[in-house]
């Protein structure tokens, strides 16, 4: 059996060694976003997650807990368009509030209309009697 001499290139790393090397090099990052519907993960960074959370007025961890990838988001939008939020919540087996947050945090929120009873309105104070007195 001949051994390679100094300076020669060894070609052919076994598949098993490649797998072992991959496992050793892979680190568990806290900046992985996991889709809440499909379960697929993707890498991200602290700044992106923090900025997204700040944009919606929550922490980065809260925003990440409602993260959906693009494919899942599009599927959810189709379900909401077809049957409404209640039907989508029933299909995905989650509460209605979670579906609303999925839509709000992952899209532009155009599918989430606020309930008119939940919108706080301030009574408008008009000075009509004073205007009438000045006119008279």
Image: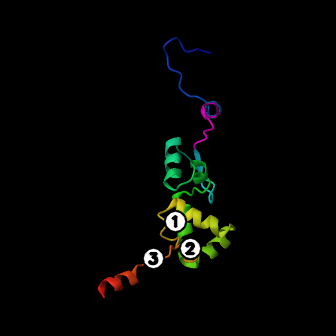
Q: Can you identify the residue that label 3 sits on? A: 125
Which of the two residues, 42 or 106, is positioned nearer the viewer here? 106
Instruction: Return the disc, 3 or 1, that comes first in the chain's sequence.
Output: 1
Q: Residues within 10 Å of mark 1 (few under 14, many from 20)?
A: some
Disc 1 secondary structure class: helix
Q: Secondary structure at mark 3?
A: loop
Residue nearer the viewer, 57 or 107 = 57
Residue 5 belongs to magenta span: no
Vertical position of residue 107 compared to residue 78: above or below: above
- Please name which of the two marks, 2 or 1, marks the residue nearer to the observer: 2
Choose the circle earlier in sequence order: 2 or 1: 1
User: Looking at this view, is 22 or 51 the one in front?
Assistant: 51
Residue under pointer 1: 74
Q: Residue 36: x, y in percent?
A: 63, 57
The magenta region covers: 22-31
Residue, disc 2: 80
Give how far across and how far down residue 3 sits, in percent: 58, 14
- Across and down, in percent, residue 85 comes to 60, 74
């Amino acid at each position: 059996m001949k051994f390679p001499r100094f300076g020669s290139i060894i070609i052919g790393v076994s598949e098993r060694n490649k797998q072992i090397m991959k496992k050793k090099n892979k680190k568990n990052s806290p900046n992985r976003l996991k889709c809440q519907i499909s379960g697929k993960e993707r890498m991200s960074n602290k700044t992106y997650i923090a900025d997204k959370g700040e944009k919606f007025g929550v922490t980065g961890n809260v925003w990440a807990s409602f993260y959906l990838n693009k494919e899942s988001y599009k599927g959810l939008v189709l379900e909401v368009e077809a049957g409404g939020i209640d039907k989508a919540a029933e299909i995905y087996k989650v509460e209605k509030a979670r579906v609303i947050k999925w839509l709000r945090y992952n899209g532009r929120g155009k599918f989430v209309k606020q309930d008119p009873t939940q919108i706080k309105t301030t009574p408008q104070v008009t000075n009509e009697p004073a205007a009438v007195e000045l006119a008279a």
